[in-house]
Amino acid sequence: MIVYKVLQFQDRNRNIVTIPKEIQDLLEEQIDLMITQCKAYLPFIKCAFPYSKNPNDAFYNLIVGSAVLVFVNQYAMRSKFPTAEDFAEFGKITLKHRELIDKFIE
């Protein structure tokens, strides 16, 4: 029987996180970069989601879709698999950027 130990780390606020700091930093950088470029993505969002009443939701989905690729690829490069706790932490990271998206697109 193989037993996997989940490594836990503490972030700046002493919260227990399971995502390694390097992956978390890359994820944050990717999300921040996409948020700063959100005005450039607006024509694509309007074309791809013509019936969407809220472009913020469409843009948030675009960011999360891009960020999940970075997230999974970073684990794959380390020959590891993200756990359920890692995906929960990923959700928390992306959710905290939601307010920034709402401020950029009004």
Image (cartoon, rainbow, N blue to C red):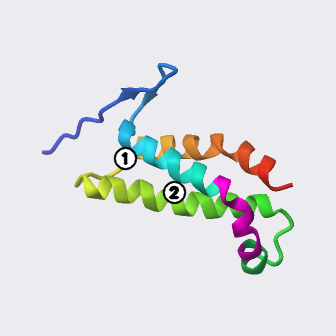
Stretch in magenta:
35-44
Taking the spot 71% from the left edge, 67% from the top edge, the residue there is: 40
Q: In the rendered structure, find residue 83 and report the number of the disc placed on it.
A: 1
Q: Secondary structure at mark 2?
A: helix
State the quadrant of the C terminus: bottom right
Q: Is the residue marked by circle 1 packed among few (<14), some (14-19), or many (20+) residues within 10 Å?
A: few
Q: Quadrant of residue 42?
A: bottom right
Which quadrant of the rendered structure holds the N terminus?
A: top left
Element at label 1: loop
Q: Which label number is shown at residue 67?
A: 2
Indicate yes or no whether the magenta region holds residue 76: no
> Residue at horizontal 58%, vertical 53%?
33
How far apart in space, not on screen, are marks 1 and 2 (Cα)?
16 Å
As drawn, the label of residue 14 is: none
Q: Which kind of residue does numbered mark 2 sit on?
A: Ala
Q: Is residue 7 above or below residue 13?
A: below
On the image, the x and y values in percent for residue 27 come to 48, 48
Residue 37 covered by magenta stretch: yes
How packed is label 2: few (under 14 Cα within 10 Å), some, or many (20 or more)? many
Q: Kindly identify the amino acid type of the residue bearing the numbered disc 1.
A: Thr
Write down the quadrant of residue 22 in the picture. top left
In front of the other: 105 or 79? 105
Instruction: Using the image as rendered, state which of residue 46 and residue 9 is in the foreground.
Output: 46
Left or right? Give the position of 26 relative to 98: left
Between marks 1 and 2 in the image, the one whose residue lies nearer the viewer: 2
Q: In the image, 20: left or right of 13?
A: left
Closer to the chain start, of discs 1 and 2, is 2
How far across and how far down the image is residue 51, in percent? 83, 76
The image shows residue 24, relative to residue 48, as above or below, that is: above
Q: Residue furthest top?
A: 14
